[in-house]
Image (spheres, rainbow, N blue to C red):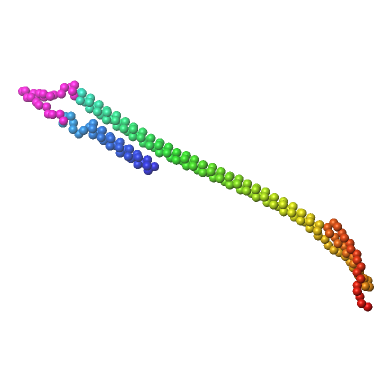
Amino acid sequence: MALVKEMKLKITTAFFRINNFFTAKFFSTTSVEETRAPCPTEHTGTKTIHLWEETSKQVALRREKGAIQIQAWWRGTLVRRTLLHAALRTYIIQCWWRRVLARVLAKRRHDALEHYARQEQAIVKVQACFRMWSIRRRYCRLLNAARIIQAYWRWRSCHTRGFIQGRYELKANLLNLQLEILLGSQAYRVTQCIPLPIKE
């Protein structure tokens, strides 16, 4: 707004300078009668005759010339005033249009930046989902392998693990021993009589 006021002041000052110049040119302070040389006169009796006396036609021509100069000055003033208003309006429209263009450019930059940010966010999200999927897939493979290994190991340990149970009976100098050994699905029974060396 300050720029518009400053430009308006400059244009108005220029208009007044041009107007003063044309006014001084068309209406000089020295009139026609002052610039014209004094008329020599001749005295004949009671009458004074001007030798260079202007005729009515010359007076009409001089007045017409002055009127034409006044009309030209006034038309020039009107034209200059019209041009001044047109220049001011043009400058105001140009300032408004520049502000509109600046707003449009700022909005376009903001939209482009927002679109870029959305694209970057979408790319990051897709990358995160892909990494999560690949890591989860690898984790599931490892988990499945661990479960297979655990199943095989449990099956093997069930088939190799066993326990022993039995009973014994002591008679005189004999030891009757009965053992039952279980290994997985197989069972073994052992019965044995062991003599004891007892001194009488």
Could you tell me which residue is drawn at 35 percent across and 40 percent down?
A: 7
Q: Is residue 80 magenta?
A: no
Please give left or right for residue 1 compared with residue 196 in the image. Answer: left
Could you tell me which residue is drawn at 91 percent across and 69 percent down?
A: 194
Residue 46 visible in the picture: no
> Which of the 4 image quadrants contains residue 20?
top left
> Which of the 4 image quadrants contains residue 9?
top left
Q: Nearer the viewer, residue 176 or 12?
A: 176
Q: Is residue 38 magenta?
A: yes
Whole-percent x, y for residue 126 in the image: 60, 45
Please give left or right for residue 169 compared with residue 93 in the image. Answer: right
Q: Nearer the viewer, residue 111 or 34?
A: 111
On screen, 147 above or below 107?
A: below
Q: Nearer the viewer, residue 67 or 16?
A: 16
On screen, 172 above or below 4?
A: below
Whole-percent x, y for residue 163 in the image: 83, 62
Q: Nearer the viewer, residue 42 or 83?
A: 83
The residue stretch that appears in magenta: 35-59
